[in-house]
Image (spheres, rainbow, N blue to C red):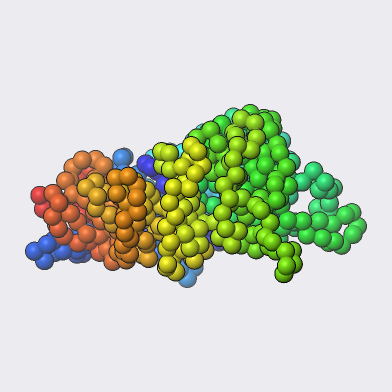
Amino acid sequence: MKYQYFLIAIFYSYSLSAQAQTKDITITDTVAGYYADQKPIPAKQYSFSEKIVAHNIDTVDGYAIVITEQTKTRKRWIYYVDLRDASVRWSKKSGAQSYIITEEVIVEQFSNNTSRGLSNDDGTMRWERKPSLIHADVKNHIGITNAGVGYDLHTGNEVWSRNLEIERGWTEHFMANDTTMMIVTPQTLHKLDIRTSRGWKYDQNPNFNMNADKQAAVNGAFMVGGLVGGVIAYAAVGGFQSAGPGKPVSQRIYMPTNLLIDKDKGYIVTDRKIACMEGENIKWEIDAPEGINAKSTLISIGDELWVTRAGGADAPQKKNKNSELPDIPLILMLGKETGSVKSKFKYDLKASFKDISERNDTAFVLLNNKLLQIHTGNHKLLQEISIDDKLITDAHATIFETDRQYLSLKKSYSSVNELYPGNTFISGPGDYILRFDDQFRFQDSLHKTSFYTLHKDINGYLLMHALSDNRGTTLVKNGKYYGHLATSQLFFVDRKLVYMTEKGINIIDALNE
């Protein structure tokens, strides 16, 4: 993405003359790393006397917005730095609690519930309004207030207004994709198009009393999940303490929900129902079968919705010692149009579901100790691979990537892996790499421990790759080792390499060509 989003909470207000601020920047020579022949790679370091707490680098227009804070006094300043010559175009004192940086404005949010937009060009104020934001979408430059008003971050003008039925402090929200915001309340789940405010509302708990005491508080935590079946999935696991008028808190009502946003539809599974939302209405709704609840996973597979059996503490259990385990499928296959059950894939009830990755007509299902390959057309089990490693028992184990020869199983969502042309695989720490033949038959497995990420010069000036790891960046040019940099956060601006440190901005004018 061209622009990055930073929201940093800070809590004091001070002032300092603009004249004194630019004098705090010092320029020194430094060594960024070494070429393959051990010659140093020189760089210029532009240092601030204060700690950098937030920054946004625009690699196209070639500037950086830098927000600094003095450690002892908590004084803060905003700098506009031209990365082509490292000059400061303007600087300004700031007393905001948090910042939102877009390609045109810096939005300051203050403790008095006020937001103010400053022009990136010169730091002048474009607009000011109340209340402050509960969410800002930088890509679409839309800000949303808790009063249900959306406005343009660049102009400050109102774009839309809608009654979202949100009680402040009772709501969690997240972006399901570039334009879709999901809003979770104790009773309902809202889908909102941040450009138009259109969307739907699903009643998660119709028996919930919304006339509860206004002092009642949310005591649960909401967690955002990762990619499932190529789209964002969300799991909210929260609790709300309800209290009738004049009565103490009487009970805790949990509202766990799993949501899948797939194109123009939303699929929801709760402890009671599975539903499909389209437009502003419920397209279909069915009762959740035994073993299916809000801890089940939703996956979009062609024209089918796959719903997995709940795992962990919610996995099926024997009713008594002599009873048989209930006959509950591992995966329930539903038709997307009607919600009708098309098939049930049954498997060992003791198996704990981890993840699914789908490619063409094959779905890989990762369990706690097995990897299943299922044909997505006829739902038949094609092969079953035993994996004897602690990786799969890890709570965060997941399938990351597949192709016709390799399948990567990674340990945590923080790892980054890449499949490279020529069947070269570079993987994250603790990962398993499974190799298949041309017919997708399992061959063997590899265990990789290196950690690399691929970077490219998107502007086309340098014929090099930067493979970043925790120890820095290895430079590769024309397929050969070229050098090493002591950073893993590189940006290309024209023919320069720019990277941030805690002290300031380092600029490498040019590499040897």
User: Is residue 168 depicted above or below 503 in this figure?
Assistant: above
| Horizontal and vertical percent position of residue 307 | 59, 46
Using residue 395 as the reference point, say whether residue 217 is left or right of it.
Answer: right
Q: Is residue 337 left or right of residue 35?
A: right
* Residue closer to the observer: 156 or 398: 398
Q: Quadrant of the N terminus?
A: top left
Residue 486 at least partly seen: yes
* Residue at the image position 46 percent from the left and 42 percent from the top: 375
Residue closer to the observer: 285 or 68: 285
Task: Tell me: 33 left or right of 195.
Answer: left
- Relative to 247, does residue 271 appear above or below in the rendering? above
Task: State the residue at coordinates (70%, 51%).
Answer: 290
Closer-to-camera residue (229/467): 229
Quarter of the image where one finds residue 32: bottom left
Residue 54 visible in the current orientation: no
In this rendering, the answer to whether 422 lies above or below 30 is above
Q: Position of residue 158 (x, y in %)?
A: 60, 32
Look at the picture and state if 154 lies above or below 499. Answer: above
